[in-house]
Image (tube, rainbow, N blue to C red):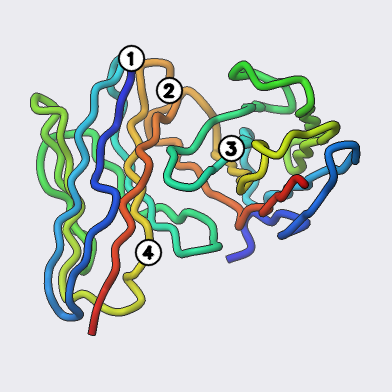
Amino acid sequence: ETGVTQTPRHLVMGMTNKKSLKCEQHLGHNAMYWYKQSAKKPLELMFVYSLEERVENNSVPSRFSPECPNSSHLFLHLHTLQPEDSALYLCASSQDIGEPTDTQYFGPGTRLTVL
Amino acid sequence: GQNIDQPTEMTATEGAIVQINCTYQTSGFNGLFWYQQHAGEAPTFLSYNVLDGLEEKGRFSSFLSRSKGYSYLLLKELQMKDSASYLCAVMDSNYQLIWGAGTKLIIKP
């Protein structure tokens, strides 16, 4: 399945580093999402973009900064992270938002470890 | 608040049947999704229910009762490859997905 790709798959960074996560979707979708997945917790929605416009920001700390240059690409820029930010970061896309049948398709995630 | 409840872990035997339950309390309802997630991989879409009743898709079926705020995923003829986490999610009135924490299903030979 190569509909939604994410790089890197694994990332280890120190608290003073700056890094970026990349997501690309090849499905012709208009909406893209960033989620955080921690062990034994529900998926936490971080950001939603529709046609490159941010439509949702669920009180995410400013050390996470999203960027959506076009409807196929989504980035998550990371700086001065904390150890509790260690998690699996998942990207997803859907045809649109605001429709009940908008199934989200996920990438494989980036496993982030903050030391 | 909004809440999705599902068991943390279940164990079943290869070839058997298992039912994974999900109960929800959300602000509005625009459908319920089930996803499968193998360890270290992407969640993949299994089913969508918006009307009451049973939807069958091969070995997997999903049931919904909106009046009871309840759904289940039924897996038949279990195979070892079905070992995974199963995520229940409800789309609320704002068309946002509210997720459960997932049920880890362990299949034993």
N-terminal-most mark, 2 or 1: 1
Same chain for mark 2 and mark 4? The answer is yes
Amino acid type indicated by mark 4: Ala
Q: Which residue is mark 3?
A: A35
Q: Are marks 2 and 3 in contact (CB under 8 Å)?
A: no
Same chain for mark 1 and mark 3? The answer is no
Q: Which residue is mark 4?
A: B84
Q: Are marks 2 and 1 in contact (CB under 8 Å)?
A: no
Q: Which residue is mark 2?
A: B95
* In the image, residue B33 above or below residue A63: below
Q: From the image, which quarter does the N terminus of chain A lie in?
A: bottom right
Q: Residue at x 42, y 45 (%)?
A: A40
Residue B95 x/y as whole percent: 43, 23
Residue A107 x/y as whole percent: 61, 53
Q: Could you give the CA–CA distance between mark 1 and mark 3, rounded to whole angstroms?
A: 20 Å
What secondary structure is found at the residue carrying circle 2?
loop
Q: Which mark is residue A11?
A: none
Q: Nearer the viewer, mark 2 or mark 3?
A: 3
